[in-house]
Image (spheres, rainbow, N blue to C red):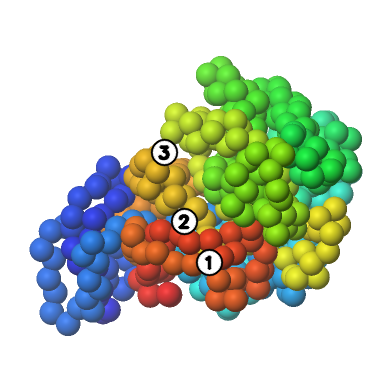
Amino acid sequence: MRTLIIKGGQVIDPKNGLNKTADVLIEDGSIIGVDAGVNKNGAEIIDAKGKVVCPGFIDLHCHLREPGFEYKETIATGTLAAARGGFTTVCAMPNTDPVADSRAIVDFVLAKAADQGVVRVLPIGAVTKESKGTELAELGELADAQVVGFSDDGHPVRDANIMRQALLYASSIGLPVINHCEVKSISAGGHMNEGWVATRLGLKGIPNSAEAIMVARDIELAELTGGHVHIAHASTKGTIDMVRRAKESGINVTCEVTPHHLTITDEAIMGHGHDGDPYGQLKDDAYDPNAKVSPPLRARADVEAMVSALKEGVIDLIATDHAPHGTVDKQTTFADAANGISNLETALGSLMSLVHLKNIDLEGVIEKLTVAPARLLGRDDIGSLSPGTPADVTIIDTEAEWVVETSQFASKGKNTPLAGATMRGKAETTIYNGRIVT
Ligand SMILES: [Zn+2]
């Protein structure tokens, strides 16, 4: 029997209402209990004094790129990046090549994850065949293969009737449909948020309504079908207002927000350290393709709305939308660059900036990364330090200062607008199933 004791940390376990100095006892990969003064002969001890000890994070939305885009990421590198960021469970989006629209591909992902993954991988199946939006995938077959939801992420489910059918089928299976809400006829040709920054930079913008119109549609369809729609990467105040109203009327809608939509505005595309003066000099790193993401980085008012919606509870959870790319995908003009940010290794650092600014408390952040996604997944066995559950534990040094060096990333994706930034707070140790991963 292998025994591990994490000693003297500030244990934060929102599911169990714990926030106190205590020891965590782990035996044979499972949590045995959280208590003061735990001792056992022969136990391996981790000294967590001055650190925060919490359940391993769960990422409901990430792109592991395998099969098909192994030059961007693999299940091995993506799950190691996850562990470095404090995540012990990641939900893999199906926009691989081939798309995870059949049992064979989902089985492949699960087999690869069992063989090479260092944390838990939960696959998400496609809504439509090849995610082309024209014909429903075999949702029942995908559910049998253990997918945790359906999504065509990367693309919206364009056709309203297909979305309606998907919600009907998915609700009979008890799984959510996760939609990337974007009306392409509105966003088409846009490269960043529509607003004064886009005008200043001479780039075509994407208005907030490109997102909000589809959110409105999906809420109507969720009400019509009784299905569960989960809004991926909510980024606008309008989205939040609609989700709030829908929840008040009892419609089965949930939503997530990314660390970047909580912390970075579209002004980042004018370059690091820009003072936000519309007439000010652009910085050397203006037009950084690493700041190009879908949905785009939004205006200050939207970012502020995201933070207050997170505090208010309208936003259910935080997900990274980790979207690693190869350098060839990003080292091009802003217009031609791929969308996405490599996020797993900086997510906590970004969120800690909100904690240090006292915009949100650490317990709230941990809740949105642990029990909240577990609840959405309907999983009682992850997202907490409850006795008898797998010992997935993250130890956080909230004060550790570090500089984002993309060359040090475990992820193959070096694409982040945060390269070179100084962060305060990081996952120091990540334990998955009782084993120290990193
Ligand atoms: Zn998306």
The Cα atoms of the two marked residues, 1 and 3, are separated by: 22 Å
Image x and y of residue 340, in percent? 70, 56
Q: Are marks 1 and 3 in contact (CB under 8 Å)?
A: no
The 10 Å Cα crowd at callout 1, few under 14, some 14 to 19, many 20 or more, is some
Pointers 1 and 2 in contact (CB under 8 A)?
no
In which quadrant is the N terminus drawn?
A: bottom left
Q: Quarter of the image holding residue 358? A: top left
- Label 2: how many Cα within 10 Å (few below 14, some 14–19, many 20+): many
Give the labeled residue for mark 1. Answer: 404
Q: Which of marks 2 and 3 is nearer the N terminus?
A: 2
Question: Disc 1 marks which amino acid?
Answer: Val
Q: Mark 1 or mark 2, which has the lower sequence index?
A: 2
Q: What residue type is labelled 3?
A: Asn
> Where residue 275 appears, x then y in whole percent?
60, 44
- Residue position for label 3: 359
* Rendered view: 212 above or below 248: below
- Between marks 2 and 3 in the image, the one whose residue lies nearer the viewer: 3
Q: Where is residue 72 in the image (x, y as percent from the top left)?
A: 72, 70
* Residue 47 sits above or below residue 224 on the image: below
Q: Is residue 396 left or right of residue 218?
A: left
- State the residue position of label 2: 348
Residue 192 visible somewhere in the drawing: yes
Q: In this view, does 104 lie above or below 276?
A: below
Alpha carbons under labels 2 and 3: distance apart: 15 Å
Q: Residue 328, labelled with which disc?
A: none
Looking at this view, is 321 or 146 the one in front?
A: 321
Q: Is mark 2 on a helix, strand or loop?
A: helix
Percent of width and height locating residue 203: 83, 44
Q: Is residue 386 in sight in this rendering?
A: no
Q: Earlier in the sequence, mark 1 or mark 3?
A: 3
